[in-house]
Image (cartoon, rainbow, N blue to C red):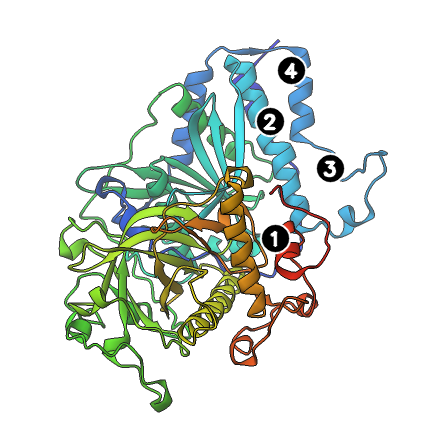
Amino acid sequence: MSNLHDFLVEHAMFPFPQPNEGTSADATDISLVEVPLLEREWKANHVVRDHTLVQKLCSTLENILGDTTLGADAENDLLSRFSPKIQFNRHGQEKPDWTGNASESHSWVLFAKGVLEALGDCLCEYGGYNLLTETEQVAFRGSSRIDYVLSVDGKDGGLLQVKSPSVMNNVRGLLPQNGIELTWARGQTLAPKVLTKAALILGLRQMEWLFITCHNYWVVCRLVRDDHHPFLAYSPMISIDHSSVPFRALLGAIMSVVRNVPVEPNEFNPNMELDTLFEQQDEGPSPTDDIDDGSPNSASSGEEIANDSSNTRNTHRTGHRTAESRLMITSSSQHSPEFSQVWIHLRPFSNNTLPLPQCAKIGNRRLWLTCFVGSGSTGNVWKCRFDGSGDFFAVKVVEVLRPADADKRQRLRDEFNIYLALEQAYQSRQLHHRIAPRCYGAFEGNGVAVLVLDLCDGVLNEWGALSDSERSQVYKLARDLHRLGISHGDLEPQNIARTREGGFCLIDFSEGGRHTCKGSKVHGHFTHLIDIRQPHLKNRCVMNCEDCEAACGTKVRPRCRH
């Protein structure tokens, strides 16, 4: 029998691989739609370096574990967690690429099989607690993902954000020595971006602890909630090399939440000397070109777009966009003080010829995101309304927070092209009724792109919810879509919406493209608008379900449960 705490101090050390650094040396940017969702007491104003933060967690763990003992079998189990044999395949043979060229993915597997499983074992040994690790979680109403949410017996304990070795190596020498004031702006340099993102992630989830790691190196973040001056405390970077400190700090944070044992508090000193960071100039528009945070020095003032005219089309042929064609959106509360509202300034897509609704022409083109509707593979959908109007619409919001998100913006452009084709078909009477929500235009700004649409009355949960007559209506929608030479690409129940008039319409064309089959009456006037991003989809039926058979007369193997 041994003392659990003493055992961890001596043995909770993990392998220290030397992986090739990943290609990404940047971090995910903050979401300007999420920032206004932070409640005041959870929105940090500063980030402050605390050189003793890790020691506070280790001391808390020692106090909680006390005289807890560990049996011999439990010792052996934990020792195997501290040295997981992931370099061997299931036949016990060593993988040839592990010794000479450990990849970044090996580090992440080592983290999951070593650190996380050891964490679960320790919680179980101490009090029979059950650790649940959920991955790739998005905050409610948000876009920011977190790699691991750690919960114990249903209670959230902490968050883990896994970064590439490149990011952690670059951050190591850039962390402010004292602290910085948070600007809540996009396009910051690496260290303030990582710290601002940490404050956003914790604030949205209203949690206290976040650990940022690439397995080898760790930074501990603590959001100190305060009605008057919330702030984020962060530790110096610590290493797992021949050290049990990172693991004990993580276990201490989780145990402090589970046992409701307070960690020695952090205090904010308003007279402290803050660091001044010199930001590098980013390519493209400056964040202040598209963001209005209520300050008098905002680059885009309210007067710029206040005097609206009925002409909503922009003047792209001359290379200029008029103020009348612009749009502003915010997720700030309509009851919040003006100085705290964050407005995102948007300009129309270059091919946007669709007018905004009449109610948008009464006053400023300001769009309030009032209610979160749902998330999809491309972006989030919000219920919204224009200033001075009681009419509600839907807006699909896509945010480019990291390089991999660029495809989402392109998919939104492709989707808008389909809405343009459908609108032209409807206006020319090729369509006698709308088969999709009416689109009122597409707009983009600094890392944000949106579609403004008619609001629907919910979506289907399953095909079985349709009556025979309703099923015929849906088949007719797909048939009419195909006759225009357009394929939906993802015709599932959640992409069939009920209209306010009681009928149905198709939504979410982010997987759509050109479509040619027996039932198509392809008109080049419409299909030239549809950009083919997936050449292998061209000239064949790809929907693979019974609605395609009804629309095209093509026998396919049903995939959907109609």
| Residue under pointer 2 | 118
Name the residue: 47% across, 64% down.
Answer: 412
Q: Is mark 2 on a helix, strand or loop?
A: helix
Which of the two marks, 3 or 1, is nearer to us in this view? 1
| Residue under pointer 3 | 86
| Residue under pointer 4 | 74
Indicate the amino acid at tag 1: Asp
Sequence-first tag of 3 and 2: 3
- Point out the image quarter for the C terminus: top right
Q: In the image, 29: left or right of 224?
A: right
Q: Where is residue 179 in the image (x, y as percent from the top left)?
A: 31, 51
Sequence-first tag of 2 and 4: 4
Give the Cα distance between marks 1 and 2: 50 Å
| Residue under pointer 1 | 547
Give the Cα distance between marks 3 and 1: 47 Å
Q: Where is residue 88 in the image (x, y as percent from the top left)?
A: 79, 37
* Residue 167 appears in view: yes
Q: What element carries label 1?
A: helix
Q: In the image, 408: left or right of 304?
A: right
Sequence-first tag of 4 and 3: 4
